[in-house]
Amino acid sequence: MKSNPVPLGPDLYTLIVVVIRKTILMSSIVFKSLYPEPD
């Protein structure tokens, strides 16, 4: 069996993008909870 010459496929790229987006979203939620915006 011949291995895939391109290990960084679109599936892995999509997974990385999703993880980065979730990390940014969580960081934003934590930041807003620590420093709430003044009403």
Image (cartoon, rainbow, N blue to C red):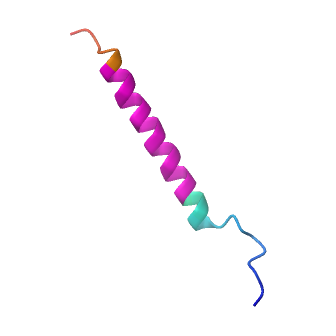
Q: Nearer the viewer, residue 17 or 33?
A: 33
Q: Quadrant of the C terminus?
A: top left
Quadrant hosting residue 35: top left
* Left or right: 38 as drawn, with respect to 13: left
Q: Main secondary structure of the magenta part?
A: helix
Rendering coords of residue 4 (x, y %): 74, 78
Extreme residue toward the bottom, this view: 1
The number of numbered discs placed on residues in the rendered structure image is 0
- The answer to if 23 sits in the magenta stretch is yes
Give me the residue at 39% from left, 22% from top: 31
- As displayed, is residue 2 above or below residue 21? below
Rendered view: 26 above or below 11 = above
Quadrant housing the N terminus: bottom right
Residue at 52 percent of width and 44 percent of height: 20
**17 within the magenta span:** yes
Q: Is residue 37 above or below residue 18?
A: above
In the rendered image, the residue lying farthest to the top is: 38
Relative to 30, residue 34 above or below: above
Q: Name which residue lies at 71% across and 68% down.
A: 7
Q: Is residue 27 toward the left or the right of residue 20 in the image?
A: left
- Residue drawn at point x = 60 percent, y = 59 percent: 13
Residue toward you, 17 or 2: 2
Range covered by the magenta-colored residues: 15-33
**Residue 5 % position (x, y):** 78, 74
Direction from residue 34 to residue 14 in the image, left or right: right
